């Protein structure tokens, strides 16, 4: 028995050793195998890479999607010719022309023109400009950013465009990079965020940004979004939120439902008392015309008076004997 078990263990070990090179080759195969054209097509994300400092590269594009600056983290040793299709930190375009990363302030200027420019401002205030490839000009219906401090080391930037209101929230740390965005389709932070930040009336003509970051009894802050620029129309129909109204008069009380006649087979509970505690008496039916209920109730009363009479007689006997 032990010999057979040992033989099985050795066989499994040898089989595993023989399979290891095959498994390694199988995992390594995709790295050397030719990829399909669809899998290797990165044309949507390719562009002109420029090193902007702090281990970041800006990939500048200006094609049918409009001007874009993809900010990717490549490391401080990056040089032209090295790969840049790596981790995306943020993206700037006409709908979000401003952000921060690694202590750098990033802004896509002249975004509606045919010659947009990326401006990168370092922490010491020095700024560098990186022109994007020439493209098609568009009508600039974007207003912003409008800065707003909201407390607890946090700030917000408000935008309005043909797509509606948008808020970019920033917090201290990580170079001040934006950590959340609010818009028409996502107008509020979840309760788990620990702060209040929301767009009130996000699809209306006059949206408002509300916030509360300190907790306690602090008042909720409010600021209106800028108005749409002249000549621009939103890409959606205005639908103002309806205010929640509370009733000013007491709600009418419900009218008691009419008592329905009971049918055959139902019973009526007798109130608790010395007559028959917890007993149930049959209800009058058309068959007995109340005889059953009357006789049963009478029998119960007779029994009660009988018990009372017996008690009186017993007391008299005791008095006589005494």
Image (cartoon, rainbow, N blue to C red):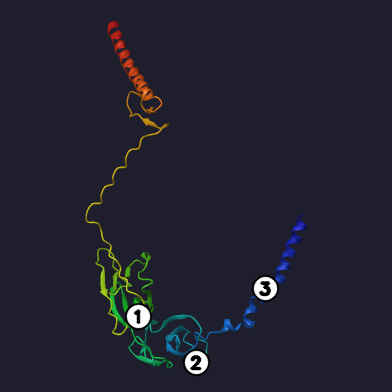
Helix, strand, or loop for circle 1?
loop
Q: Quadrant of residue 207?
A: bottom left
What is the count of numbered marks?
A: 3
Neighbours of disc 3 within 10 Å: few (<14), some (14-19), many (20+): few
The quadrant in which residue 134 appears is bottom left
Q: Nearer the viewer, residue 103 or 144?
A: 144
Residue beneath label 2, please?
80
Label located before the other in sequence (2 or 1)? 2
Q: Element type at marker 3? A: helix
Q: Which residue is mark 1?
A: 162
Residue at image point 36% right, 78% down: 235
Estimate how packed mark 1 is, as few (under 14), some (14 to 19) or many (20 or more) residues with alpha carbons within 10 Å.
Answer: some
Q: Residues within 10 Å of mark 2 (few under 14, many from 20)?
A: few
Q: Are marks 2 and 1 in contact (CB under 8 Å)?
A: no
Q: Which badge, 2 or 3, comes first in the chain's sequence?
A: 3
Residue 152 higher or lower than 295, as above or below: below
Q: Quadrant of the N terminus?
A: bottom right
Residue that lies at the very extreme toward the left in this rendered image: 249
Q: Which residue is mark 3?
A: 23
Q: Position of residue 191 (x, y in %)?
A: 36, 64
The answer for how far apart the CA atoms under marks 2 and 1 are is 38 Å
Residue 164 in the image: state x and y as whole percent.
34, 77
> Residue 320's x, y, as percent?
28, 6
Which of 66/236 is in front? 236
Nearer the observer, disc 1 or disc 3?
Answer: 1
Is residue 171 in sight in this rendering? no
Q: Secondary structure at mark 2?
A: loop
User: Marks 1 and 3, Cα distance to the nearest angstrom?
Assistant: 55 Å
């Amino acid at each position: 028995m032990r010999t057979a078990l040992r033989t099985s263990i050795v066989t499994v070990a040898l089989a595993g050793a023989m399979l290891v090179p095959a498994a390694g080759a199988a995992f390594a195969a995709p790295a050397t195998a030719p990829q399909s054209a669809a899998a290797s097509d990165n044309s949507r994300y390719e562009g002109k890479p420029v090193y902007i400092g702090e281990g970041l590269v800006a990939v500048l594009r200006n094609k049918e999607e409009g001007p874009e600056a993809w900010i990717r983290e490549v490391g401080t040793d990056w040089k032209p010719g090295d790969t840049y299709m790596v981790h995306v930190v943020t993206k700037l375009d006409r709908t979000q022309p401003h952000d921060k990363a690694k202590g750098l302030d990033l802004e896509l200027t002249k975004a509606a023109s045919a010659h947009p420019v990326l401006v990168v401002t370092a922490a010491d205030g020095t700024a560098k400009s990186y022109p994007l490839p020439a493209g098609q000009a568009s009508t600039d219906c974007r207003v912003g950013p409008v800065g707003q401090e909201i407390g607890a080391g946090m700030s917000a930037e408000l935008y309005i465009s043909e797509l509606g209101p948008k808020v970019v929230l920033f917090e201290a740390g990580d170079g001040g990079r934006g950590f959340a965005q609010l818009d028409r389709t996502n107008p509020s932070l979840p309760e788990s965020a620990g702060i209040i930040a929301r767009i009130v009336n996000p699809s209306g003509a006059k949206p408002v940004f509300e916030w509360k970051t300190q907790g306690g009894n602090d008042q909720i802050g409010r600021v209106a979004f800028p108005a749409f620029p002249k000549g621009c129309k939103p890409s959606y129909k205005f639908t103002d939120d309806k205010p929640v109204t509370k009733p000013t008069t007491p709600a009418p009380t419900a009218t008691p439902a009419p008592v329905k006649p009971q049918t055959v087979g139902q019973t009526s509970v007798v109130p608790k008392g010395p007559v028959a505690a917890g007993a149930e008496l049959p209800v009058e039916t058309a068959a007995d015309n109340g005889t059953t209920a009357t006789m049963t109730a009478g029998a119960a009363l007779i029994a009660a008076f009988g018990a009372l009479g017996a008690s009186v007689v017993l007391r008299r006997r005791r008095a006589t004997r005494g």
